[in-house]
Image: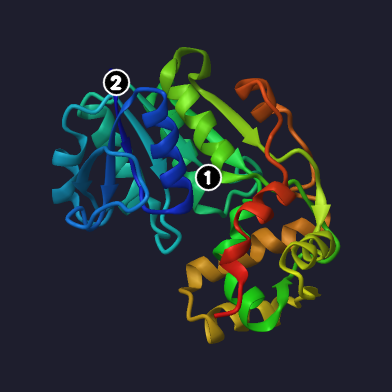
Amino acid sequence: MPRVLVTGARGNVGREVVSACVSRGLVVRAADRSASKPLEKLPECESARFDFVDRATWPEALAGVDYVFLLRPPPLGDMNATLNPFVTAAYAAGVQHIVFLSVAGADRMKWVPHRKVELHLQSQGADWTVLRPGFFAQNLGDAYRRDIVEDNRLYVPAGQGRVAFLDVRDAGEVTAKIFEKPEPFRAKALTLTGPEAITFDQVARLLSSVLGRAIRYEPASIPGYVWHLHGNRQLPWMQVAVQTFLHVGLRGGDAERVESTVAELLGKPARSMREYLERAAAEWQHT
């Protein structure tokens, strides 16, 4: 069976890619900066120490690999020093296909780091697929979690924009399906969304219903959000910039379009926001 190297294997998306690939019978090598630590809650798979900024870790991670799932760690901003050289090295090592997790709108937003990776993949040939997901439902258990747990609020500069939230489990299953038979997906960019577009007000009401306590949506100003991310949450400036601009874009409808890609590829409806919230309700309980 083909061997798949999954970068970011400990993250929300990476874990689901690993699980979906293993369930389809693919051999998975989970890449992480600390391969000595067990990958909790993951199916049994190979592991490799890997770091985009440490090129000495690349050859061993790529040895015998047929496919790569490529994910940009949020703190990394210089693609020409990290992901792009890794792409070149992967093809040189014999990798036959790369699936890159980009962002919705990367074809229009030339300033996002993901765009540079997309262009570099295109320059290397056609053995790639780009996934452009909208906002993940799991952001509520990651980027928004502290605000929900500590302040009972959703605080983002999205105005009343509507978002077709995508469950990362669907992204993982789509990725695994591509690796099963990459040929139909060569040199294609696929936009992935959830089944409906909803506002953050609606998300807050769903959260309130599921958790049994009031969660409010507080639309943030741009300066207020920047200060919240950098001053309060201590995020690096590159991550602050990307996260802020992506959320501001929601005001103009950047993520409201619903695509049928997930349902068409998987033969079942995309998972809904309520389904995710009910499954993960324990993540937002007060400690």
- Disc 1 on helix, strand or loop? helix
Q: Position of residue 111 (x, y in %)?
A: 57, 54
The residue pinned by badge 2 equals: 2
The CA distance from mark 1 to mark 2 is 28 Å
In the rendered view, does 251 fall on the left or right side of 183? Answer: right
- Disc 2 on helix, strand or loop? loop
Say which quadrant the N terminus sits in: top left
Give the quadrant of residue 155: bottom right
Residue type for callout 2 = Pro
Q: Position of residue 283 (x, y in %)?
A: 57, 66
Q: Residues within 10 Å of mark 2 (few under 14, many from 20)?
A: some
In the rendered view, does 156 fall on the left or right side of 74? Answer: right
Tag shown at residue 115 = 1
- Which residue is at a point 60% across and 57% down the rendered structure image? 280
Callout count: 2
Which badge, 1 or 2, is on the more N-terminal residue? 2
Tell me: residue 171, above or below residue 36.
above
Residue 144 at least partly seen: no
Q: Between 99 and 283, which is closer to the camera in this rendering?
A: 283
Q: Position of residue 121 (x, y in %)?
A: 42, 33
Residue type for callout 1 = Arg
- Which residue is at a point 32% across and 51% down the rendered structure image? 82
Q: Position of residue 183 (x, y in %)?
A: 46, 13
Tell me: residue 119, above or below residue 49.
above
* Residue found at the very far bottom of the displayed protein: 231
- Which residue is at a point 61% across and 24% down the rendered structure image? 266
Residue 255 at least partly seen: yes
Closest to the camera, between mark 1 and mark 2, is 2
* Residue found at the very far front of the displayed protein: 212
Give the quadrant of residue 229: bottom right
